[in-house]
Amino acid sequence: MTRLSIFAMSMIVALALFAMTAPSAQAGALPAVSGSNLVFHIDAGDISGLSDGDAVSTWTAAAGPNASQGNADYQPVYRASATPMGTAGVDFDQDNDHLDLDSAMGDAASIFFVVQYKEFGQQQMMMGNSAASQKFGHRSGVLFMDGVNYSPRGFSSTDTHVHSWQKNAAGNPGTWLEDGVDIGGTVQSFSFTGGSVIGAERSAVHQWGADNLGPAAVISEIVAYDTELSASDRAAVSAHLVAKHIIPEPSSLVLVCLSGLLALRRRSR
Ligand SMILES: [Ca+2]
């Protein structure tokens, strides 16, 4: 190995170490998407002034209406470090915790949920409006939207995941993705309209039936767009959320090493 090669290899190692230790860029803004507007975005990382275990009375949104709950019994709990990447979450007790939006969010055709389910019993309502329709969640691990199961595949992972629902459109089938991968099920053809509640519960407020519980889940981030995203935009938003909450983005490290190796090859010619 020539002296130049040794220098180049040293640079590659240094750059790789930098890539591994540098502050992650993925914690930043959502990737830009084409032809679709953000109608709702709420991130537990934006909650300030609370300590781990504190009740959440207000969850300020980055886009769209804020979420709040004045009844102490119904308030979920703040988790300072809820995900594998140490990002925060809002912990719902399944019994009666829910947050009302200050106003209904705009109609959504693409929704992303960063969520850790704690268990899978019965029906758990993740989001809905005040009527007994247009709600979504899961039934014993099968995701559904507006009453339609995304069957046949259920899931039972209590790890943090990015669940993404999208309405059916031409060339862009309505699907649920888990961490960017289609979990396989019935095409979904409707929009999610008038969303006004995160979670639901069995009390008189937002009573959607005795079998409809709130989420036994920790929610870290919700993102909703008004139209169907392209496959590439959807993949980009999924990848952003996975990298932010679940696993670090490997691409920067891979790219640095690849460019370093190419430089080494050029120099050695
Ligand atoms: Ca409660």
Image: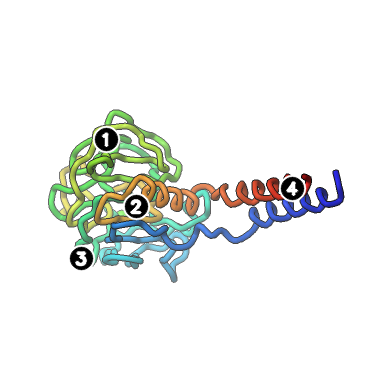
Q: Is residue 78 left or right of residue 243?
A: left
Where, by quadrant of the figure, is residue 68 drawn? bottom left
Question: Could you tell me the amino acid type at mark 2?
Answer: Phe
Q: Is residue 11 left or right of residue 180?
A: right
CA gap between label 3 and label 2 equals 21 Å
Residue 8 - label: none
Q: Secondary structure at mark 4?
A: helix
Structural crowding at the residue carrying mark 1, measured as other residues with C-alpha within 10 Å and reported as few (<14), some (14–19) or many (≥20) = many
State the residue in front, 265 or 31: 265
Residue 92 - label: 2
Task: Give the mark nearest the N terminus, 1 or 4.
Answer: 1
Task: Give the mark nearest the N terminus, 1 or 3.
Answer: 3
| Residue at point 22%, 61% (across, down) | 105
Q: Are marks 2 and 1 in contact (CB under 8 Å)?
A: no
User: Which residue position holds label 3?
Assistant: 103
Q: Secondary structure at mark 3?
A: loop
Q: Are marks 3 and 2 in contact (CB under 8 Å)?
A: no
User: Which residue position holds label 1?
Assistant: 150
Quarter of the image for the C terminus: give it: top right
Query: Residue extending furthest bottom?
Result: 49
* View quadrant of ligand 1: bottom left
Question: Could you tell me the amino acid type at mark 3?
Answer: Ser
Q: Secondary structure at mark 2?
A: strand
Q: Are marks 1 and 3 in contact (CB under 8 Å)?
A: no
Q: Are marks 2 and 4 in contact (CB under 8 Å)?
A: no
